[in-house]
Image: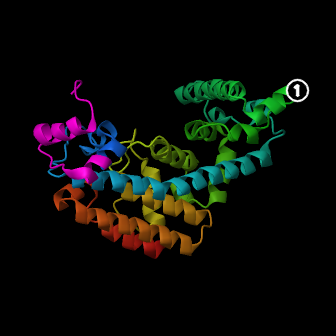
Amino acid sequence: MSKIIGTNKLMKHLRTKHNIRIVGSSHKQKLRTFGYYHGYKGYRFIRTSTNKIPFSSFDEIIAFNQFDLELKTLFYPSIMFIETALKNYVLEELLKNAKSSSFESIYDDNLTCYKAFSATDPKYRKEFQKKLRLRNQIYNVLSREYSNERKIVKHYYHSNKTIPIWAIFESISMGEFGTFTSCLDSKIKKSLSSSIGFNQSCDTDNRLTEKIIFQLKDLRNAIAHNDVIFDTRFKNSNASNELKKCLMLDTGINNITFNTLTDYFILVVYLQKLLKVSKTELNRSINQFDLLLNTFRTKVPINVFHKIFETNSRNKIIALKSFV
């Protein structure tokens, strides 16, 4: 494969090596635009490289690429909205309790989750080390933003002022935001969870907010970097039982596992509803997701489709509409 160059030779390679029907100027242009390595190699399997899709026509590969792109287009604005909204909710609850808006003051006085444990408890050491790592992460972010001529960071440094926490929140990643939320004092996390509207019976340890942030982080990053999302291969860890229980209780939808993108979509809609997005907008999003799945189902073999989405996906979407 290392000697193969040019679109014509790549088309020949797909025909002779992979037995995929690819002919004509339309197929050639599609291969040229989404590329062999991203467009074919990235979509030739489901979740793991050993679970290969038995493609027979290049039209099926096009369908996968188009489906994945349309999913990212659907998810992206909702994920960005949720990330921004959750950051603002955290800031609101944090500043109710903080003596100052400076990171240094908040770091000392409000990132005290470790104090929920005795100093002899291994969890104390674990949480305190997390707090120490977070400080280094924040300072690295500020150093990077200053080097990149970020105006807001330069303004505070050049004015000899302390950078406020809200300015830091503009620069940190979703993962760093999740860690920050995890380090918050337990009382602030409890107030935060209640303010957002989470089911308190599922949040007895006050960690549901951070669990949701981390659950969405991998999807958000995959979308931002144009990675494959249709089969949830982006997922780095299993969802917490508390999160799954919360979704099932509040939405009335059973068997939420986060093994398929449908469950991520349920979480996104659930959060948007808590954040007061209108029913009209939520229903529009659900109908669009439903249409994407139905269209994709007609373009690929049904046995392949059900390797990606559960047979009860349609029932979940109907139940989600009822929840909204």
- The answer to whether residue 139 of the structure is visible from this angle is yes
x 58%, y 28%: residue: 130
Front in this rendered view, residue 46 or 154:
154
Q: Amino acid at mark 1?
A: Asn
Tell me the chief SS of the magenta region.
helix
Residue 164 in the magenta stretch? The answer is no
Query: Where is residue 105 shown, x and y percent of the image?
Result: 79, 32
- For disc 1, the marked residue is 160
Query: Where is residue 54 shown, x and y percent of the image?
Result: 15, 48
Q: Quick one: label 1, few (<14), some, or many (20+) residues within 10 Å?
A: few
Query: Where is residue 143 shown, x and y percent of the image?
Result: 69, 24
What is the secondary structure assignment of the residue under circle 1? loop
Question: Quadrant of the rendered structure where residue 50 is?
Answer: top left
Front in this rendered view, residue 64 or 76:
64
Q: Which residues are magenta?
A: 1-29
x 88%, y 26%: residue: 160
- Seen in the picture, residue 232 relative to 265 is either above or below; the reply is above
Front in this rendered view, residue 194 or 6:
6
